[in-house]
Image: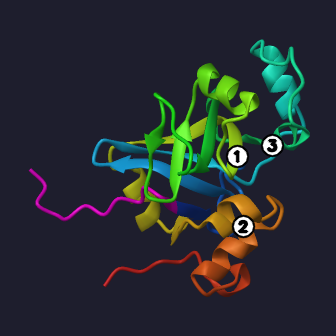
Amino acid sequence: MNDQKFFSLKGHLLIAMPQMNDPRFHRSVIFMCVHDRKGAMGMAINSPLPSPDFKEVLHQIGLAGKPIDPKILQTPVLSGGPVQGVNGFLIHSSDFSQKDTIVVDDNFSISGTIDTLRTVISGYRPEKMLFTLGYAGWSAGQLEKELQDNVWLTAPASHEIVFDTSAYDMWEKAFTIIGVTPGTISGISGRA
């Protein structure tokens, strides 16, 4: 049994280091919704998809038959990661809850069913939300190894970064949370 204390990154951001060599995660900012000793799951929140847009997503799942608030239709559709890219997830403020909602922390929740989207377009919806297709996943110990290898930096998630920052500015802005700029950090790590 491992006696080491475990620090969960649930409710934090993973920020790809400048030297990230996996093109799927180059300059990624990932919102972590699950992280325990069994593994981790998060969604990239700064990779807008050129298509489908949110209206097309709603049409594809049979929810575009009635008039929808134009503000809802502006919800960005993001590539959340390479796993199960057809599954949608709503990352949202904690002022909204459905039967399937997973509370991440006091500020963020995740919902992921067609019933949730039906509720959102009917008028009951969170103040802030993003929609992702797919997610990023790590097996037990894999993320911890990547952190040791200096692949990611971490920072607490905030509504300002997650919901109010343009996807195109998010990577650089996320670095400011921890007080650095991408050009001032090195990918070389050492062990004492």
Please state which of the two labelled residues, at mark 2 or mark 1, is closer to the viewer.
Answer: 1
Residue 137 horizontal side relative to residue 184, left or right:
left
In the rendered structure, which amino acid carries the disc numbered 3? Thr
Q: Secondary structure at mark 3?
A: loop
Disc with the residue nearer the chain's start (2 vs 1): 1
Whether residues under marks 1 and 3 lie with C-beta atoms below 8 angstroms apart, the answer is yes
Where disc 2 sits, the SS reads helix
Give the side of residue 186 with respect to residue 76, left or right.
Answer: left
Look at label 2 and name its amino acid.
Answer: Trp
The C terminus lies in which quarter of the figure?
bottom left
The numbered disc on residue 75 is: 3
Label 3 and label 2: CA atoms lie apart by 20 Å
Q: 35 or 68, which lies in front? A: 68
How many residues crowd mark 3 within 10 Å: few (<14), some (14–19), many (20+)?
some
Report the magenta residues as a range. 1-12
- Residue 54 lies left or right of residue 105; in this view the side is right
- Where residue 118 sits: x, y (%)? 68, 23
**Residue that numbered label 1 is attached to:** 130
Residue 6 image position (x, y, % from top left): 25, 61
Write the residue at 42% across / 80% down: 190
Residue designated by label 2: 171
